[in-house]
Image (cartoon, helix red, strand yellow):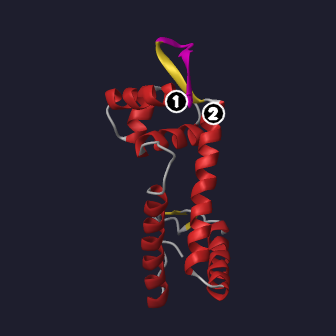
Amino acid sequence: MTGESTQRASDAAQAAAEELAMVVRRLIRRLGSAPTGGLTPSQRSVLLRLEKDGASSTTFLAIAEGVRSQSMTATLKSLDALGLIERQPDPDDGRRQIITLSGEGRDRVARDRRERRSWLAEEMDRRFGPEQLATISEALSLLGELADQRPPAPVRPATADAPLRPL
């Protein structure tokens, strides 16, 4: 269904979508508050960004994280002291440094991810029985199918001489 559609989702689908969005946000927040082995949330966020986006500069990391360059410099200094990042001179601008994850930084991100998933699995085992876990698994399978579905082609706005059609 697209924003251009004349059909509306059923009330049940609307309610489920709203509930799902809230639950996902709460789960992300809860996973984010799980122990990180002594890293601050901003340190963890920078490591994850470097893992996802690759090499970056202090300025770009600061912009991406929504902090001042001075704050990012302090975060990077602490990550450097822990051996989690590496700095190389920027070949195009000698004043800048290119920041990347070190081998230990990549290991730390992977370990942190495993620990969070393990925590979630343990909590699910503790709180839910086999039938509930099977229901969750089935719901996740259905949501996975939805996530894997190709989005509809964008629609070009109609003009007086051209009808609506895919781009």
Q: Which callout, 2 or 1, points at the residue further toward the start of the chain?
A: 1
- 91 in relation to 130, above or below: above
Coordinates of residue 93 in the picture (x, y in percent): 49, 13
Q: Quadrant of residue 136?
A: bottom right
Coordinates of residue 147 in the picture (x, y in percent): 62, 68
- Looking at the rendering, the stretch of residues picked out in magenta corresponds to 82-94
Which amino acid, mark 2?
A: Glu
Which amino acid, mark 1?
A: Leu
Residue 82's disc is 1
Q: CA distance from mark 2 to mark 1?
A: 9 Å
Coordinates of residue 36 in the picture (x, y in percent): 50, 48
- 97 in relation to 103, above or below: above
Residue 49 can be seen in this image: yes
The C terminus: image quadrant: bottom right
In the rendered image, residue 85 lying in the magenta stretch gets the answer yes
Secondary structure at badge 2 equals: helix
Front residue of this view, candidates 55 and 47: 47
Coordinates of residue 29 in the picture (x, y in percent): 43, 61
Q: Quadrant of residue 92?
A: top right
